[in-house]
Image: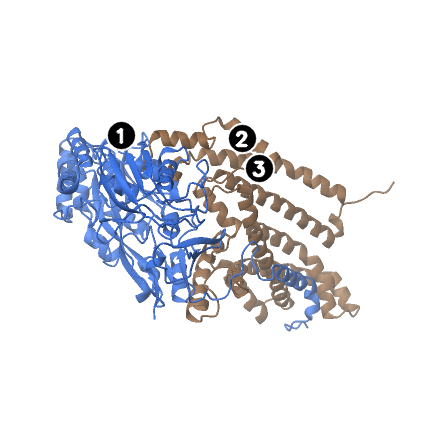
Chain colours: A blue, B brown
């Protein structure tokens, strides 16, 4: 009879067991090429968990969210900064600035500021920063994002005075300059630098690639000493894991959480300036008839989407920029949900010969923001109910970008592209020029009248500028209807009870550690 | 044995070249990565500059010749995303995956041998039924779900383990437990089946009739003959893990090659993708040779014959 009792001793497992011990022993339970910083962080360290590792900390790439969130106003600083609450520009390394002609701006620079390598900050460094980021062949991301093809003429008049000249009058040059993080003249102007030197309150201590970045407070900082001596950044792709790290005490601040992450009262909502909308291609049928584009707006139940998918945390949108952006039109109301009206508009267009049965591709980027798949399915269903023939195309980022940016794919039929637009700059020009101008990189169409309105708004300043952009958003909804706006999003930040921090609309792009303090 | 090894290495070279060429060509067929690396409103001039700066404006054959020239000099190029040396990034990530895979497979094999042999001693007995249920469940549970549930129970609710990361011995537990279950479940089934078959062979009866103890029967007679199928499957499972435990690496923040490869595919980071695939392919070829040598040790019939003059 066989016995079901184990008939052999550990001897039979001698070799596998030895191998197992050897593997663990050799590794010493330390993952290869990592620093075993296992102990809980000290109370003078704030631990932040990001959604991805920054590809670089290069200052001229700091408009990239994953880079800027670590480097901006922590390691490096701009000449001018935009207050995220008031929207006003405020002094940083420049103390004052004014237009000295139509095309020239003069900036007075702060004295007594040093870089973390001990060299002084002066007009020469400021001029070098602008030349390097805007006029060089480095291919800086901030150049394309903020300045386009425009080169700037920069001159260090003396140690504390800088002039910047633009080819055409540019009323928002100071706002554009707020995107440039200042670096010393010793920074390479022929290669990008992964770990920059700046004037900020923290300097880069260590970067264990793949694992974590540590910043330490810099004693030579010109401003107030920050409360935390160190900031430690890790990254996890899964938002539920980031939330769990705050819940379990492994992190103090978690970025980019989803309403489903069950973080409870440790989740803090903040307006992240992102807006979700559908962009419709009016060069093809059936969107070449404005009634069909209006029907799309009527067919989408925005209130239902916001309340059921996003727990009421988002706001129904009536334009591409949220409140707080210069040019936001607070008079505009979202299109009401009216399925009957949508159906009748589609029927009218069909009666006039528009082929409303032609397939529309609803193009959506996988995992672009929380619950995007569910949102896409809801939209497909609601547009189908309105009488349109919609096929959902879920694509990865690279493929989706071919639909988002010119030149758009040909022979694709009609396309409704789901966009998530974030205006980091605070001025509607950064939205309108891209999305509404006939030559805009992300615009399907416009009209000569609309283009003229946009050009005029771009050149205006002050209240005139604000009014001009407000009119543009109203005109879009009334006469153009390239967009079906859905919602202004709300970001969720996980903040442990051990930390005092109130996020604002720029926290997703620029997380200032100096604004965090330990809870008493 | 040396001749055998030399033959295997030579025969592996061609597939390796095919892999390199295939990855190189397929990656470039996915389009120009400029739109991923430039702002959405970048001008055409900026796109052209980016393409020229990274040599992507050259004909494919020229790019491929440059790449092969670089490989021969062990220069795999620079990452588009980080600006770092692509080979250094792959070499930094690979050992972390290897450690995870090796530890997981050793534990899976040990546990599967114990449980599989135990189940095989009395087919359809209670032990067999329990082990069948456990192994089927283990082989069927999706690792993504298991990882998240593991974090919820052991990190959040009980607080025994860290949620993720690589700090300290406790950080190994959840990733290994998550990875372990499937190979364990599969291997238990294989070991159990092979052992049931081996234990019914005439030579086992002969061994017993000669008075051999149960331990000797199982380890020296049955297990030795039943091990080959398990070794084959364990080899395949190990290859899968060496290729990168993407889900586990992603969820637990394990800085391994699987996550690096997926990220480099999504980011069209060609140089890193090529370096990571080449390194993994070489490792898998080496692993296959080791598995073949393992067969030879287990079974005299597959040992290379050396004919003496």
Question: Can I make out residue A410 in this image?
Answer: yes
* Residue density around tag 1, few if under 14, some if 14–19, many if 20 or more, within 10 Å: few
* Residue density around tag 2, few if under 14, some if 14–19, many if 20 or more, within 10 Å: some
User: Up-down: is B173 above or below A348?
Assistant: below
User: Up-down: is A517 above or below A476?
Assistant: below
Real-space CA distance between mark 2 and mark 1, rounded to the nearest whole angstrom: 42 Å
Taking depth in this image into account, of A319 and A485 the one nearest to the observer is A319
Real-space CA distance between mark 1 and mark 3, rounded to the nearest whole angstrom: 43 Å
Disc marking residue B64? 2
| Residue assigned mark 1 | A167
| Residue assigned mark 3 | B75
Q: Nearer the viewer, mark 2 or mark 1?
A: 1
Q: Nearer the viewer, mark 1 or mark 3?
A: 1
Residue B42, image quadrant:
top left
Horizontal arrangement in the rendering, residue A371 relative to residue B235 (left or right): left
- Say what secondary structure mark 1 lies in: loop
- Say what secondary structure mark 3 lies in: loop
Q: Position of residue B115 (x, y in %)?
A: 60, 66
- Residue drawn at 36 percent across, 33 percent down: A135
Which chain is home to disc 3?
B
Which chain is home to disc 2?
B
Q: Position of residue A233 (x, y in %)?
A: 43, 56
Taking depth in this image into account, of B14 and A192 the one nearest to the observer is A192
* Residue density around tag 3, few if under 14, some if 14–19, many if 20 or more, within 10 Å: some
Q: Position of residue A493 (x, y in %)?
A: 32, 59
Horizontal arrangement in the rendering, residue A54 relative to residue B93 (left or right): left
Residue at mark 2 shares a chain with residue at mark 1: no
Quadrant where the N terminus of chain B is found in the figure: top right
Question: Can I make out residue A390 in this image?
Answer: no
Real-space CA distance between mark 2 and mark 3, rounded to the nearest whole angstrom: 13 Å
Taking depth in this image into account, of A494 and A181 the one nearest to the observer is A181
Horizontal arrangement in the rendering, residue B279 relative to residue A492 (left or right): right
């Amino acid at each position: 009879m066989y016995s079901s009792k184990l008939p052999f001793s550990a001897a039979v497992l001698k070799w596998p067991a030895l191998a197992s011990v050897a593997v663990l022993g050799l590794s010493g339970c330390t993952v290869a090429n990592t620093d075993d910083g296992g102990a809980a962080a000290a109370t003078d360290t704030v631990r932040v968990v990001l959604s991805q590792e920054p590809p670089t900390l290069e200052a001229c790439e700091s408009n990239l969210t994953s880079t800027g969130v670590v480097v901006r106003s922590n390691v490096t600083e701009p000449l001018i900064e935009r207050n995220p609450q008031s929207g006003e520009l405020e002094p940083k390394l420049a103390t004052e600035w004014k237009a000295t002609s139509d095309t020239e701006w003069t900036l007075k620079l702060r004295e007594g500021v040093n870089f973390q390598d001990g060299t002084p900050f002066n007009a020469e460094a400021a001029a070098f920063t602008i030349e390097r980021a805007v006029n060089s062949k480095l291919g800086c991301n901030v150049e394309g994002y903020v300045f386009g093809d425009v080169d700037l003429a920069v001159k260090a008049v003396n140690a504390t005075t800088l002039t910047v000249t633009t080819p055409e009058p540019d009323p928002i040059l100071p706002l554009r300059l707020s995107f440039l993080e200042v670096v010393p003249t010793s920074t390479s102007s022929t290669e990008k630098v992964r770990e920059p030197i700046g004037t900020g309150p923290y300097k880069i201590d260590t970067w264990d690639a793949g694992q974590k970045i540590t910043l330490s407070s810099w004693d030579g900082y010109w401003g107030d000493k920050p409360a935390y001596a160190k900031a430690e950044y890790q990254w996890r792709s899964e938002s539920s894991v980031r939330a769990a790290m705050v819940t379990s005490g492994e992190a103090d601040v978690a970025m980019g959480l989803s309403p489903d992450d069950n973080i409870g009262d440790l989740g803090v909502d903040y307006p992240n300036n992102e807006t979700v909308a559908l962009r419709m291609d009016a060069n093809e049928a059936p969107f070449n008839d404005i009634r069909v584009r209006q029907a799309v707006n009527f067919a989408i139940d925005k209130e239902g989407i916001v309340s059921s998918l996003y727990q009421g945390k988002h706001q129904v949108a009536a334009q591409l920029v949220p409140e707080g952006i210069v040019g936001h039109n607070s008079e505009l109301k979202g299109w009401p949900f009216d399925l009957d009206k949508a159906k009748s508009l589609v029927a009218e267009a069909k009666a006039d010969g528009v082929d409303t049965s032609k397939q529309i591709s609803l193009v959506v980027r996988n995992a672009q923001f929380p619950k995007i798949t569910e949102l896409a399915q809801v939209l497909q269903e609601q547009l189908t109910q309105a009488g349109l023939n919609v096929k959902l195309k879920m694509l990865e980022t690279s493929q989706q970008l071919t639909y988002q940016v010119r030149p758009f794919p040909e022979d694709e039929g009609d396309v409704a592209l789901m966009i998530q637009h974030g205006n980091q700059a605070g001025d509607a020009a950064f939205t309108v020029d891209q999305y509404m101008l006939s030559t805009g990189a992300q615009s399907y169409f416009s009209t000569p009248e609309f283009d003229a309105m946009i050009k005029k708004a771009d050149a205006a300043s002050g209240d005139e500028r604000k009014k001009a952009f407000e009119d543009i958003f109203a005109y879009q909804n009334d006469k153009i209807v390239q967009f079906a706006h859905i919602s202004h999003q709300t970001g969720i930040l996980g903040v442990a009870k051990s930390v005092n921090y109130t996020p604002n609309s720029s926290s997703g792009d620029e997380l200032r550690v100096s604004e965090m303090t330990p809870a008493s | 044995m040396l001749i055998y090894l030399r033959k295997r290495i030579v025969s592996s070279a061609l597939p390796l070249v095919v892999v390199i060429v295939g990855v190189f060509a397929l990656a470039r067929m996915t389009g120009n990565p400029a739109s991923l690396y430039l702002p959405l409103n970048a001008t055409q001039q900026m796109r052209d500059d980016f393409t020229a700066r990274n040599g992507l404006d050259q004909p494919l054959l020229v790019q491929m010749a440059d790449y092969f020239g670089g490989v021969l000099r062990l220069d795999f190029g620079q990452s588009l995303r980080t600006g770092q040396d692509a080979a250094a990034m792959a070499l930094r990530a690979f050992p972390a995956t290897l450690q995870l895979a090796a530890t997981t497979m050793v534990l899976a094999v040990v546990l599967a041998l114990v449980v599989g042999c135990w189940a095989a001693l009395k087919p359809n007995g209670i032990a067999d039924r329990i082990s069948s249920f456990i192994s089927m469940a283990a082989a069927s549970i999706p690792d993504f779900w298991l990882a998240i549930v593991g974090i919820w129970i052991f990190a959040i609710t009980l607080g025994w383990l860290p949620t993720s990361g690589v700090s300290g011995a406790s950080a190994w537990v959840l990733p290994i437990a998550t990875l372990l279950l499937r190979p364990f479940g599969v291997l238990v089934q294989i070991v159990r089946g092979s052992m049931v078959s081996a234990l019914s062979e005439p030579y086992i009866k002969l061994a017993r009739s000669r008075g051999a103890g149960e331990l000797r029967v199982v380890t020296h007679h049955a297990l030795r003959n039943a091990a080959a199928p398990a070794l084959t499957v364990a080899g395949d499972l190990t290859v899968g893990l060496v290729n990168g435990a993407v889900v586990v690496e992603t969820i637990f923040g394990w800085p391994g090659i699987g996550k690096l490869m997926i990220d480099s595919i999504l980011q069209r980071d060609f140089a890193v993708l090529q370096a990571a695939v080449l390194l993994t392919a070489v490792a898998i070829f080496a692993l296959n040779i080791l598995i073949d040598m393992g067969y030879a040790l287990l079974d005299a019939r597959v040992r290379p014959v050396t004919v003496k003059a």
